[in-house]
Image (spheres, rainbow, N blue to C red):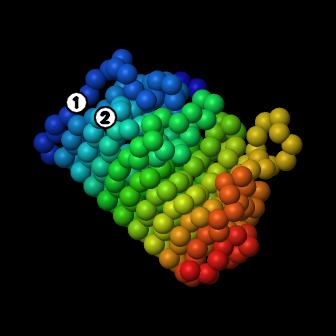
Amino acid sequence: MRRRLGLILAVSATLTFALWTAGASADNVTLPLCPSLGNAVSGTYNGSLTITGDAYVAKGATLTVRGNLTIAPGACLDAFSLGTVTVGGNVLVGSGAILALGCSPGALGPPLDQAPCSGQTTSDVVGGSILANQPLTMYLTADTIHGSVISNGGGGSAALTTSFPIKENSIGGNLIVQGWQGAWFGALRNHVRGNAIFQNNSAFIPGVTGQGPDSTEIVANTVSGSLICTGNSPGAQFGDAGNTPNVVSGNALGECAAISVKG
C-alpha cells in the first residue's frame, strides 16, 4: 500500500524548521520501515506537529516538538535512525500508522534484520505518553518516556510479516500492549515504573506452522508495579532472546509468572 506523501504542520506559535524533500543520504534508505522514503523532517516546532504520508528523521538530524507529535492514520514516521527526537507533549499514533523511534547497537529492522545504529545509542525523549490506537506497528528503542506507553489493537492482515519491538526504554508510567496481531511482538530490557500489561496479542507468520513460535518475548524487564500477561498467542516466553527473567516489584501474573522473579 502506498500512502500520500506530505506533512501537515500544526503549530500554535512561532515555528522554526528545516524541511526538505528526500534525496539526501539517510539510514532509512536501506531500512525502509515506511512504504516509501518520503520527506525528511527536522528542526524546532514550538507548537504541535502532525505528520501525514511517509517521513523520516535522518542520521545526525534533530527534531524538537514542544507540543504533541501526531502520526495521522495510515502515516509513517521513521526515526529508527541516529537522529535525535525530543517531544514535550504526547506522541499520538493513529490507525494503521507506523512509528519508529530510537536506536541502539542491538536494534534490528527490515530488510533482512539489518542494524542501522553503528554501535551507538540515541537519546530520544517524550515528555508525555505514547498513545497508539490500532497502529500497524511501532519500533520503540532506547527512548526515555516520562509518561506511559499504551497501544490498543492494530496490526492485522497487513502486519503478518511485521514486528513490534519495545526494547531498552525507560518508561515513567505504565506499559500496556493489547490486541495487536503480527509476525512478532516483544518487550525486552525495559525499565517500567508503573505496571506492564500484555493481553490478547497474537502472532502469525504466513507459511509457518503454529502461531509465530518465537513471538511474545517478555524478557529482562524491570517493573516497579505488576507484570500481567494473559490471552497472548503464543503465551509470554523467553523465546530465543535468552532466559534472563523479568524483575517485578509487584506481582507477576498469568503467563509471565513463570518467567519472572521478585524484585
As rendered, which of 217 and 232 lies closer to the eye? Answer: 217
Q: Nearer the viewer, mark 1 or mark 2?
A: 2
Which residue position holds label 1?
A: 18
Whole-percent x and y of residue 5?
A: 41, 25
Residue 240's place in the image compared with 255, above or below, is above
- Residue 215, position as x, y percentages in the image: 71, 52
Which numbered disc, 1 or 2, marks the residue that appears first in the sequence?
1
Query: At 76% from the left edge and 40% from the top edge, which residue is drawn?
Result: 205
Secondary structure found at label 2: loop
**Mark 2 closeness class: few <14, some 14–19, many ≥20 residues within 10 Å:** few
Looking at the rendered image, the quarter that the C terminus falls into is: bottom right
Quadrant where the N terminus sits is top right
Numbered disc 1: secondary structure: strand
Residue 148 x %, y %:
44, 64
Q: Which residue appears at 48% of the width and 68% of the height?
A: 192
Residue drawn at x 53%, y 36% as measured from the top left: 115
The kind of residue on which mark 2 rests is Gly
Look at mark 2 in the image and give the residue it sits on. 60
